[in-house]
Amino acid sequence: MTISPARIHVVSDPISDEHRSRGYHPERPERLGAARRGVALSGVEALDLAARDATDEDLERAHARAYLDELARLSGHHAALDADTYLAPRSVDAARRGAGGTIAMVEALLQDASVKSGAVLLRPPGHHATRDQGMGFCLLNNAAIGALWALDHGLSRVAIVDWDVHHGNGTQNILWNDPRALYISLHEAPLYPGSGAREEVGQKDGAGFTVNVPLSEGATDAVYQMAFEELILPVLGKFAPELVLISAGFDAHERDPLASMRLTAAGYAYMGAALARVAAASGRGRVGIVMEGGYDLTAIEVSLAATIQGVVRADSPRIEGEVSTTHRNEVAAAKAVAARWWPGI
Ligand SMILES: [Zn+2]
């Protein structure tokens, strides 16, 4: 018996590099160079997949027309949506390609069962972009747009697991009432943007389909592993996603300059592998990696490589290490909230 080598779709596009601030900004084109080195470092065969421009229909599943009109008005100019969030003349074009590239990956995963995973290496990132407003370096919410596309093209349940160190307030906002999309975020708290409390669980039909796991600074690989085992994997098992999207920021890495978590490559490998097993159980193995933040180039390279290895192998070494009482209590408190909607987890 021959075992076919692992392969992964990789979406990139040079237009991402045209999203560049006039002065230094941590969300910079060099980040994707590091990501591409990470793909090579993983040793997994990369299949280049062309990005495309998202259509207005694609964008309007996630964003208000008034906000999209505002972006169209700013396109072609240097501008800023807030103190953190710059636009260069081609930034809106790059964002539209980022959203469309995410859709291209999702479509490939749904159409071709022979390749189970994909990675979208495009900028600007997306998870802070709400229905009405770009912020936090983000213009269009790539992960939410990809999830909503999948839900409009045959799927009934999509999970987004957001391990960027910041809370994905935009993704939460867009999917707040939607029980077809399970949004799970692990994030450092307190930290920008300040949302993501445990009690933020969604509303109406979407109540319980937002799961927030705020963790205080210093969380290690072992803490994240505990959060997965105690809470995140049991909820995912009950939800049974047909597709798992990872909002993959790498700013919870110990090297990152903007945050104070202590993840290493081993933690990313663990999380990628765990989510691949979730996807294998209910989603034909389909896992899509969507780049979010991460501001240390070495951390991006080694963490993305580890994530890809974890995802394609669906296996990773067990993480040993102590979990502080503070972090243990935080995971337990998040689990207690989630258990109201997911009894028996
Ligand atoms: Zn971030």
Image: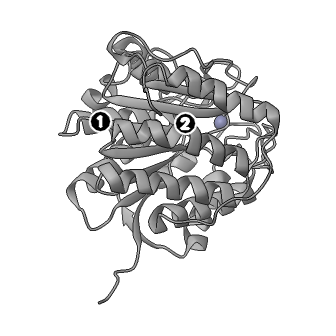
Q: Residues within 10 Å of mark 1 (few under 14, many from 20)?
A: many
How far apart, in angstroms, are the residues tagged by discs 2 and 1?
19 Å
Instruction: Out of 16 and 282, give the one closest to the viewer.
Output: 282
Q: Which kind of residue does numbered mark 1 sit on?
A: Arg
Q: Residue furthest bottom?
A: 1
Left or right, 193 with reference to 343: right
Q: Amino acid at mark 2?
A: Leu
Q: Which residue is mark 2?
A: 231
Compared with 81, 159 (above or below) is: below
The residue that disc 1 covers is: 157
Is the N terminus in the top left, top right, bottom left or bottom right quadrant? bottom left
Q: Nearer the viewer, mark 2 or mark 1?
A: 2
Q: Nearer the viewer, residue 96 or 7?
A: 7
Apparent side of residue 121 relative to residue 294 in the rendered image (left or right): left
Farthest left residue in view: 154
In the displayed structure, 329 sits above or below 317; it is above
Q: Quadrant of residue 219?
A: top right
The percent position of residue 109, horizontal first and vertical second, equals 29, 55
Residue 88 in view: no
Residue 114, quarter of picture: bottom left
Q: Which mark is residue 254?
A: none
Image mark count: 2
Counting from the top left corner in percent of width and height, residue 145 is at 37, 33
Q: Secondary structure at mark 2?
A: helix
Residue at point 35%, 36% (across, down):
239
The spot of residue 196 in percent (x, y) is: 61, 21
Name the spot of residue 63 as percent of width and height, x first: 38, 20
Q: SS of the residue at dot 1?
A: loop
